[in-house]
Image (tube, grey):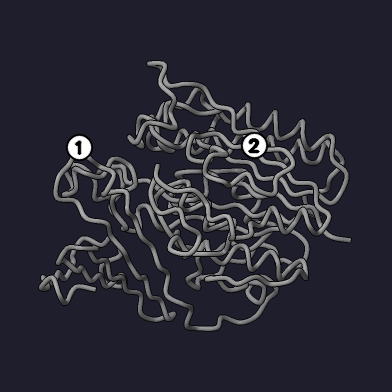
Amino acid sequence: MQPNILFVSLDTVRADVAYNGRMPGIEALRASGVTFRQAISSCPLTPVSHATVFTGLQPPRHGIRHLLREQLRKDVPTLAELLRGAGYSTGAVVSCPGLNRWYGMDRGFDFYDDEIPLLPDGRDPLTVGDVKMRGLALKRAPVVTRRAGDWLAAQRTPFFLFAHFFDAHWPYDPPEDVGVQTRNPYEGEVAYSDHHLQGLLQRLADAGHDPAATLIVLFSDHGEDLGGWYPNDHAGDRGHPEEEGHGCLLFDATQHVPLIFSGPGVRAGVEVPDQVRLVDIMPTVLDLLGLEPQASDGLSLRPLLEGASSPGTRPAAYSETHFPEERTDRAGLHPLRSLRLDDGVHRQKVIWQVGGDEVGYYDLNSDPDEQAARTTILGPDSAP
């Protein structure tokens, strides 16, 4: 019998905050599953990163590369489509403009709740390119939990539910104190999301579905650069005024994200130090379920979930952002691409401009906060 599947996206949550030990919901999942300590996102934008999760493809192949320009390629199968074809009921409750059905991420879902309010000034948030302003249009976590729980209560097995929490996105104004010690309002929003994650897991159990028998995948699409609240921030006065939370840069503040698997066939209470990628999620799930593999830019993490020793070298983690092309309020910005390499001993990253002439190299062993780039200026014909 195939297991039920629950995907939880904690949008805009940094790995170091997710793993700070003060989030009870996240800690419970870590205790029951496998925590990947070095998971890397493909893009610091919600629609681009989630498209990678649900297709197993990097942005150049799934087709979404900007915040507001593209939709998911119609010839690319999604995980929801494959699971529905395998007999799963499929449902999603999403909470921000970046997952509106316009992008095509609703394909394969029987139920796709993407209702969100208008912006305070009455504009449709889907037409607004300011990533901070779009954060004012969201479903709050209690609504996500209630609607996802109502859908769960009506399901028989097997089902696939995707629940998306957007609360950690700007503005950082947690609606209530949930009793977790935090260092700043951003962490308060993460704690608020975590509190309602616990509520969702309780709704899962109340609906008669054993969380221990459910394949649960928790991740974040990208992190957040708080402009100096954390040592590895680069935004604002830290040298990059173009960065407002996320979108324009590819440092680990936004690219290093949490990733946890829990459920049948997954070891409990294990931490994996190997570098993995969000693009690995879809091939891993298909492998765990014994379903036909799809053409993918990712690899199955099943051996690591089931107890294989560390393989040593993992593939380079590719990231990109073309959002700088959409920043019409700032001149001279270039799209960026990066490769993060980790062979278990050496951890390095290269970030380069697309159409520009700067390449930055970072030794993450000696410089984990990416503050001391070795920058190379190349001629226009020799840039990567």
Image coordinates for residue 242, horizontal then vertical, percent = 21, 44
Q: Quadrant of residue 293?
A: bottom right
- Left or right of residue 310: residue 32: right
Q: Check disc 2 and report the residue beneath it.
A: 93
* Element under disc 1: loop
Q: Check disc 1 and report the residue beneath it.
A: 329
Q: Is residue 158 above or below residue 229?
A: below
Image coordinates for residue 190, horizontal then vertical, percent = 49, 38
Q: Quadrant of residue 12?
A: top left
Name the image quarter holding the C terminus: bottom left
From the image, state whether disc 2 or disc 1 is nearer to you: 1
Q: Nearer the viewer, residue 307 or 22?
A: 307
**Count of marks, rendered view:** 2
Q: Residue at x 44, y 51 (%)?
A: 222
- Left or right of residue 296: residue 208: right
Q: Residue at x 35, y 53 (%)?
A: 253
Q: Residue at x 16, y 77 (%)?
A: 382
Q: Is residue 123 above or below residue 312?
A: above
Q: Is residue 141 above or below residue 357?
A: above
Q: Nearer the viewer, residue 29 or 359?
A: 359
Name the image quarter holding the N terminus: bottom right
Q: Is residue 7 above or below residue 59?
A: above
**Which of the labelled discs sits on residue 82, or is there none?**
none
* Marks 2,1: beta carbons within 8 A: no
* Element under disc 2: strand
| Residue type at the position of mark 1 | Asp
Q: Quick one: label 2 or label 1, which is nearer the N terminus?
A: 2
Image coordinates for residue 379, horizontal then vertical, percent = 10, 73
Q: Nearer the viewer, residue 94 or 267?
A: 94
Q: Quadrant of residue 201?
A: top right
- Left or right of residue 357: residue 20: right
